[in-house]
Image (tube, rainbow, N blue to C red):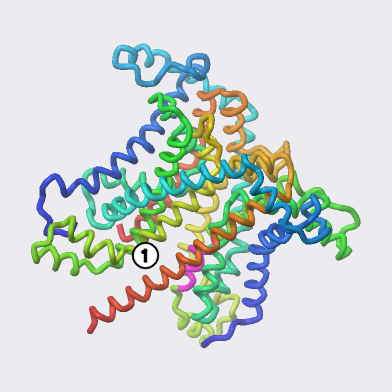
């Protein structure tokens, strides 16, 4: 493992095992998705003809190439709106997650040193608890007879219950709640590293706390802001559980469309094409995120 | 020692209230006597009894646990190897693809991964069920294990390994007698993370399952779609309790790891 190891083939065994696993269970599946997305619906609905049927069938297969599924995505209103509103809902939710997560991460980074491990654990703990359970917890809070409406009625803020469940607002709340730890952790690690003497110097030179924040703290925490936003935005675009359980019939998100296409319509080629387009939308943010991670890990 | 400003106290209090009140309400109302999960009628543990008498839920729990144990163990072996590759092999031909395959599943929407794996299993004619969920979970959790173990290996002092190798210890024995004991806390945290991720997963399991293998999240999901039920609150509370114990164990292990790193650093200096 170190530089002194002999150069025999056994040296490469540690590479070969996980590499082979990932090629079989990660790379090849994606190539199959790509292939099926170019197949005819009729020939690809299960039990559809197997993908690997030797070289004789390969040419036959190649001629069956069709852009039909992609044409449908481009032409259909449903897909357009679903992609658009997925990106929109994920964007709004990411913004609010940053808005809520930043002060929390800031408070943590400013807290006494001996508090920090406990605070960190309190942030991580909900992230370990089942995602599904946390989304479910909001269901009983947001119904018309739920805790939130009861509280607001009791406090006299509203006179009649609000319809929050089954609206996009519920989806925003669900995403912000579920993904908040993903935002707080990179923000905290960026803010914690900051050198306090910079702020002291600024205040000695007459800078107000607010202008110090925007001129020093925020720019220095930018890598954390970027990492956090990607960590929330990318999975939120493809989110299925939250819009399905908290959203309404007018909440269109591409994860839900794909799920229905797959489990209800059983149109596998269409679902594959939807997945490929979703990946194309996410490939730029994923690449930026990966690049940053690789850099942070030291290459 | 700095004191927290009132602004920080308020934001931290509100922030943690936002994170914990929903979970707390869910736990409290699992002990509610009535069937409504928002109106308190009295103390009762009858929903717990009904969880344990619900054969479907218990069967699903068993399936889920076994999948989690198998996939976490396999993912830990593969993920640890992958972490060694990431930190020790530098740039070799194909390293970019490997790094990409490790980091991509961390952020990729689960629904895409689930669909891709299902199509693979159908294409190779693998009968879907317990083992296909296990393989799928291994694949996406091994990347998380790799990242956790990698972060430990980055701060690892390689001179110990080099000394052992120089003294004629074979690489494999060096790994098991020197490297593994030192990175063990990270490996265990990786296993626990893989275990909870597998326990938790709904989307990938739904895609890769077949007749006869229904996991607990799948059961919970189909019940939750129809509305809120105190029984679900009860099973959720049990799961939250189990996971909390796991997290506390992990954080103790991490504390030990930090102490060990500190000792290493001191030894290197002295």
Above-or-below relation of B67 to A43:
below
Q: How many marks?
A: 1
- Residue labelled with disc 1: B185
Above-or-below relation of A61 to A203:
above
- Give the magenta part as a residue range: A183-192
Quarter holding residue A295: bottom left
Above-or-below relation of A143 to B186:
above
Residue B231 pos. (x, y %): 70, 49
Quarter holding residue A36: top left
Q: Residue at x 19, y 47 (%)?
A: A12
Q: Residue at x 22, y 59 (%)?
A: B175
Horizontal side of residue A194 vs A52, given as left or right: right
Query: Would residue B124 be visible to someone looking at this image?
Result: yes
From this viewpoint, which residue is outermost toward the right?
A: A159
Predominant secondary structure in magenta?
helix
Horizontal side of residue B94 vs A42, given as left or right: left
- The quarter of the picture where the N terminus of chain A appears is bottom left
Chain letter for mark 1, please: B
Quarter holding residue A156: bottom right
Residue A137 pos. (x, y %): 68, 53
Residue A66 pos. (x, y %): 46, 18
């Amino acid at each position: 493992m170190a530089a002194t190891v002999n150069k025999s083939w056994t040296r490469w065994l540690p590479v070969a095992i996980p590499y082979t696993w990932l090629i079989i269970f990660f790379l090849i599946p994606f190539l199959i998705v790509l292939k099926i997305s170019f197949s005819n619906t009729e020939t690809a609905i299960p039990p559809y003809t197997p993908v690997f049927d030797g070289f004789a069938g390969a040419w036959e297969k190649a001629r069956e190439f069709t852009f039909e599924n992609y044409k449908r995505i481009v032409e259909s209103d449903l897909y357009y709106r679903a992609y658009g509103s997925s990106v929109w809902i994920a964007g709004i939710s990411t913004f609010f997650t940053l808005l809520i997560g930043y002060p929390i991460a800031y408070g943590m980074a400013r807290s006494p040193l001996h508090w920090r491990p406990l605070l960190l654990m309190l942030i991580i703990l909900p992230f370990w608890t089942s995602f599904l359970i946390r989304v479910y917890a909001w269901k009983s809070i947001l119904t018309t007879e739920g805790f939130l409406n009861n509280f607001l009625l009791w406090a006299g803020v509203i006179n009649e219950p609000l319809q929050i469940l089954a609206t996009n607002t519920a989806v925003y709340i669900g995403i912000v709640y579920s993904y908040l730890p993903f935002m707080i952790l990179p923000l905290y690690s960026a803010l914690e590293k900051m050198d306090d003497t910079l702020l002291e110097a600024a205040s000695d030179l007459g800078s107000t706390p607010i202008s110090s924040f925007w001129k020093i703290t925020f720019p220095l925490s930018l890598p954390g802001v970027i990492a956090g936003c990607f960590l929330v935005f990318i999975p939120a675009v493809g989110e299925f559980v939250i819009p399905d359980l908290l959203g309404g019939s007018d909440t269109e998100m591409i994860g839900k469309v794909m799920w229905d296409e797959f489990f209800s319509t059983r149109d596998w080629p269409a679902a594959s094409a939807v997945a490929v387009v979703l990946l194309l939308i996410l490939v730029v943010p994923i690449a930026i995120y990966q690049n940053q991670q690789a850099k942070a890990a030291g290459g | 020692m700095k004191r927290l400003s009132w602004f920080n106290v308020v934001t931290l209090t509100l922030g943690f209230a936002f994170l914990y009140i929903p979970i707390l309400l869910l736990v409290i109302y699992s002990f509610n006597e009535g069937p409504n999960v928002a109106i308190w009628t009295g103390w009762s543990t009858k929903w717990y009894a009904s969880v344990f008498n619900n054969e479907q839920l218990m069967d699903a729990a068993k399936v889920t646990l076994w999948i989690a144990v198998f996939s976490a163990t396999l993912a830990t072996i593969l993920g640890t190897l992958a972490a060694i590759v990431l930190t020790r092999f530098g740039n070799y031909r194909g390293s970019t693809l490997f790094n990409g395959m490790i980091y991509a599943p961390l952020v990729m929407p689960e629904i895409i991964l689930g669909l891709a794996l299902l199509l693979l299993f159908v294409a190779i004619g693998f009968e879907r069920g317990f083992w296909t969920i296990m393989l799928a979970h291994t694949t996406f959790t091994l990347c998380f294990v790799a990242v956790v173990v990698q972060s430990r290996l980055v701060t690892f002092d390689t001179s110990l390994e080099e000394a052992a190798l120089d003294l004629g210890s074979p690489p494999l024995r060096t790994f098991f007698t020197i490297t593994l004991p030192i990175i063990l806390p990270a490996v265990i945290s990786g296993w626990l993370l893989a275990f909870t991720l597998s326990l938790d997963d709904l989307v990938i399991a739904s895609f890769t399952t077949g007749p006869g293998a229904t996991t607990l999240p799948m059961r919970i999901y189909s019940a939750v779609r129809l509305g809120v039920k105190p029984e679900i609150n009860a099973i959720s509370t049990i799961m939250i309790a189990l996971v909390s114990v796991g997290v506390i164990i992990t954080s103790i292990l991490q504390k030990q790891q930090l102490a060990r790193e500190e000792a290493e650093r001191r030894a290197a200096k002295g």
